[in-house]
Image: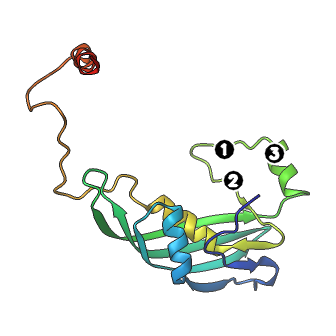
Amino acid sequence: MIAEPEFSRPVRVGSLPPGGRTYAIEAKPDERAALAKRFDLIGLDSLKATLRLRPVGRQVRLEGDLSANVTQRCVVTLEPIEATVEERFEMCYAEGEGDEDERFSERDIVVEYEGEDVPDPIVGGMIDIGEAVAEHLALALDPFPRKPEARFTGVEEEGEERSPFAVLKGLERKSD
């Protein structure tokens, strides 16, 4: 069972004018709380985005700017760290031939390192611009947030080097 996205803003691509359309979206408090849980954040105080969808041939291009105020946990001290995330992104969507599940499970997709990304699917004539914003927020988050003054202090004294065997021997004595 596929879970419903926490921040869903579906757009029917068939209704887009030839020049495209601009959208301004903002997450509501309950959506922000659900996204904070999904991304293991202490808090998500705001999430806003300005997006432009425009048809380009048989594809649809999404260009977006997102802004968020997040609170993460320092990986060293576990204290809260507040941060502002500003991210610009682009995505491309395309209609598939036939059933979506069949198209993506049976077809080999070749991704070139320096090439363009494979277009995301347009499902049921819709693109969820809210989920696109949520995905790019997740990509923009600091994976190892750390307070500038936070220092990790290990078990060993500074300057003392211990071999892995000495550490194991110490563990052996503790278990007696």
Amino acid type shown at disc 1: Val
Do the residues under discs 3 and 2 have CB atoms within 8 angstroms?
no
Who is closer to the viewer here, 49 or 116? 49
Q: In front of the other: label 3 or label 1?
A: 3
Amino acid type shown at disc 2: Val
Which x, y percent locates residue 121? 76, 61
Quarter of the view holding residue 91: bottom right
- The residue to which callout 1 is attached is 111
Which x, y percent locates residue 59? 75, 67
* Residue at x-position 31% and y-position 70%: 82
Amino acid type shown at disc 3: Ser
Give SS at disc 1: loop
Q: What colour scheme governs how the chains and residues are painted in the rendered image of this protein? A: rainbow
90 vs 51: above or below: above
Left or right: 86, with 126 as reference point:
left
Do the residues under discs 2 and 1 have CB atoms within 8 angstroms?
yes
Image mark for residue 105:
3
Q: If the image is split into quadrants, where does the C terminus sit? A: top left
Give SS at disc 2: loop
Image mark for residue 118:
2
Who is closer to the viewer here, 21 or 11? 11
Q: Residue furthest front?
A: 176
Quote the CA–CA distance across marks 3 and 2.
14 Å
Quote the CA–CA distance across marks 3 and 1.
15 Å
Q: Earlier in the sequence, mark 2 or mark 1?
A: 1
Quarter of the view holding residue 79: bottom left
Q: Earlier in the sequence, mark 3 or mark 1?
A: 3
Mark 2 Cα within 10 Å, few/some/many (few <14, many 20+)?
A: some
Give SS at disc 3: helix
* Residue at x-position 57% and y-position 46%: 114
Q: Earlier in the sequence, mark 3 or mark 2?
A: 3
Left or right: 155, with 125 as reference point:
left
